[in-house]
Image (spheres, grey):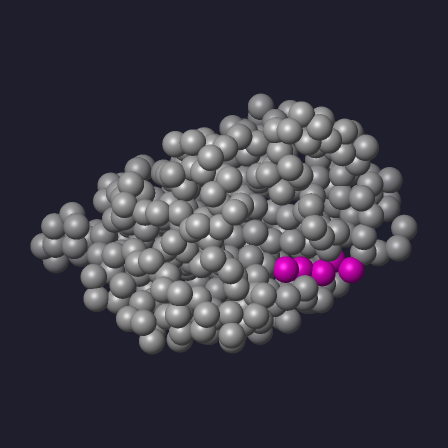
Amino acid sequence: MDEPEFSIGIEEEYLLVDKETLALAVVPEGLMADCEAALGGQVAPEYLQCQIEIGTKVCATVAEAREDLAHLRRTIRDCADNYGLTPIAASCHPLADWKDQHHTHKQRYDQLREDLGGVVRRMLICGMHVHVGLNDDALRADLLSQLGYFLPHLLAMSTSSPFWQGEDTGLASYRLSVFDNLPRTGLPPQMDSWDEYQRSVQALVDLGVIEDATKIWWDLRPSAHYPTLEARICDVSPRMNHALGLAALIQALTRLLWRLRVRNQRWRRYDNFLVQENRWRAQRYGTSDGLIDFGRGEIVPFAELFEELLELVEEDAGVLQCAQEIEALREIMETGTSAERQRAAAQGAKAAGADTEEQMRAVVRHLIEEFSTDL
């Protein structure tokens, strides 16, 4: 089998906040026009009027993606500054109330509101999607069923949504609790072939339930528009280096599974009932508690699992020239996930005598600072 290109593309969703009040702000038409003039089709409005979405070009390497993503983040930040606004890359705003938000009037979004009712109104969340290029549909289907095992590991490191409406939820990723209210979400089903996947999607299309596969929002899915696998499990990362590290790890894991395939090997496939338990543990604890190693039959500290991941993809990271970006994830292991850093910011404000609302504002200020840290 010819080796795929393993090209990479990154999509991120940001929240726009008022620089003075730190509250969510509606994206002005002028700001959207400025961003589009500077970035063309790499920027778009999102479901809610306080959100904006960017996407890198198709990149051959993570180093190339770094250059593009830095340009996108800087441009959004600089354009927003002209309107007294600034972006944050966190999956939930610590203080905002979803009932105060309004959806963007666009045919697709109007239809979503009509189809999904009340649950879509709570979608005050942002994520990161990573596309890895694969040039064969049968290969996409085969790796889909194996890569799902690693989704909880990726979620754990990305968690950036501990607060919701001014309260600590006790979760590292509350975003997932909101998103899972939608249909056709969660872990991808374990399908044995591309034909089986197509038949399943077509059954819903023929019934008029969905128009196409873009209305399937699994944590990992074959893209409907590109020859890629699209990992959608991650919270959006406040710091660009962490976003790139997670993207690089997804790329390297995809190549690892391809490498096993060409050697007539594969990653053992576990029932979603078991993988879901790790997904929940990642959602609840981030990296502060372990995940289940089903082969060993025990809960293993995440720091140990992280070192195992690095060893697993060492060869692939070398070939893909992304070892440096993956190594940067070690910072998360040393200083904590964004969820932990946000809680530390809140605790610091509390120790200084701030009330609950001001503690949340301190978290927003922390997120504003982190957005530009690696640019």
Residue that sits furthest to the left in the current view: 353
Q: What is the x, y in percent for residue 101? A: 32, 47
- Residue name at image x 49 percent, y 45 percent: 109
Q: Which of 170 and 317 is in front in this view?
A: 170
| Dominant SS type (magenta) | loop
Q: What is the x, y in percent for residue 212? A: 66, 39
Q: Which of 21 and 328 is in front in this view?
A: 21
Q: Which of 301 and 212 is in front in this view?
A: 212
Q: What is the x, y in percent for residue 244? A: 55, 62
Q: In this view, does 171 lie to the left or right of 66?
A: left
Q: In which quarter of the image is residue 201?
A: top right
Count of marks overlaid on the render = 0
Q: What is the x, y in percent for residue 81? A: 34, 73
Q: Is residue 42 visible?
A: yes
- Residue name at image x 37 percent, y 61 percent: 27
Using the image, determine if residue 210 lies above or below residue 32: above
Q: Is residue 254 left or right of residue 303?
A: right
- Residue name at image x 71 percent, y 35 percent: 145
Using the image, determine if residue 314 lies above or below residue 20: above
Q: Can residue 66 be seen in this view?
A: no
Using the image, determine if residue 260 lies above or below residue 7: above
Magenta residue span: 5-9
Q: Is residue 61 left or right of residue 46?
A: right
- Residue name at image x 22 percent, y 56 percent: 361
Q: Examine the structure image and report whether residue 300 is included in the region drawn in magenta.
A: no
Q: Is residue 14 left or right of residue 326?
A: left
